[in-house]
Image (cartoon, rainbow, N blue to C red):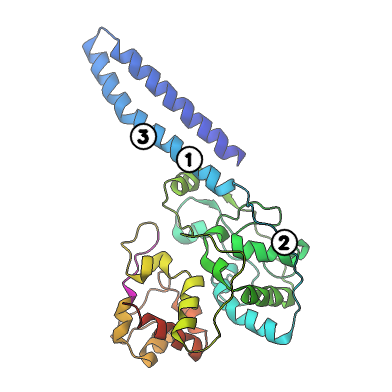
Amino acid sequence: MTSKVITLLIVMALTLAVIWLTIRAFRSPRPVVKWVGVAAGTLVGPILLLVSVMAARGIIQLYSPSDRVVPDLQVERTPARVARGQEIATWCASCHSLTGQAPLSGGKNLSEDVKMPFGDLYPINLTPAGPLKTWTDGQVFRAIRHGADEKGNRLPVMAAQAVGFLSDEDIHAVIAYIRSQPPVQNETPPPNPSFLAAVMSGAGMLPKRTEIAPDVIVGPPRGPTAEYGEYMAKWMGCEECHGPNLAGSQGGFLPPGPNLRSVKGWTREGFIAAMRTGKTPFGKQLDSLQMPWKPLGRYSDDDLTALHAYLVTLK
């Protein structure tokens, strides 16, 4: 954070310098100096001021500590719970693994994926050899639900993820699975967003949760129902790309997602096949970088049926 604060102070100093020089130019008796100076100042000054404001806001967003209390929790690792956690962690593997599959030994820098200089944003090693070995179960729970590390510092990527809307029991299952993995040695750098990331965060151009997850969440019964499909779409963060109410997004930083009401024209079998093969019932090949069909395709027929059942109910 120190380097970003120093950069912010430099930008603020440049802003003040431009304002001062613009005033000096305006008072100059020489017309060329006066109007060229004023024109340059009125062009550069507001840009620097806007960058300063956005950067300050972004630094606060990225580094403000979490006020959520760590729950007093010790998860019992039952076979059923571990198995359930492994199923859910299929989604986690898309970031926390270099292969997209278990073990969750840490992923590559997400800045490389989006091809932007956003700093070090490495999904950490979640096996017992990683940082979580010294965390309590309650601290892991808070990291998933509220996006904060063991000290309460904000985790820039996790704090923006919708996985915080997993039910309490499903988070317990994920914790049980994480603790049961074989340890894999792989050290990832701590999160260190760049100044550009701070500016874009302050400008609202980076993904973020549109609502705060409550402290207690009770999920619906698991099954091939629209209710359970809505729950899946919530914690998987479908709205991040497909827009509010899944009505489509015009894009921006994230890839634009189509209106998912188009799925009304797909059969259940066609939807499941699309999630398993990446090809829609109409022959269009889905981009795996824009639409994570590969991790979705590893879910059971019942889970995918639930998602389809929910999408066809959208009005």
Q: Which residue is mark 1?
A: 55
Residue 131 shows which numbered tag? 2
How many residues crowd around disc 3 within 10 Å: few (fewer than 14), some, or many (20 or more)? Answer: few
Indicate the position of residue 202 as horizontal and vertical percent values.
46, 45
What amino acid is at disc 2? Answer: Pro
Q: Is residue 309 rendered magenta in the image?
A: no
Does the residue at mark 3 contact the one at mark 1 (Cβ under 8 Å)? no
Q: Which residue is mark 3?
A: 47
Residue 307 shows which numbered tag? none
Give the quadrant of residue 248. bottom left
Q: Which residues are the magenta region?
A: 254-260
Looking at the image, is 52 positioned above or below residue 63?
Answer: above
Identify the residue at image location x=34%, y=79%: 285
Disc 3 and disc 1: Cα gap in Å?
12 Å
- Residue 236 is at least partly visible in this image: no
Query: Could you say which is closer to the camera, residue 164 or residue 293?
Result: 164
Looking at the image, is 37 positioned above or below residue 141?
Answer: above
Earlier-in-chain disc, 2 versus 3: 3
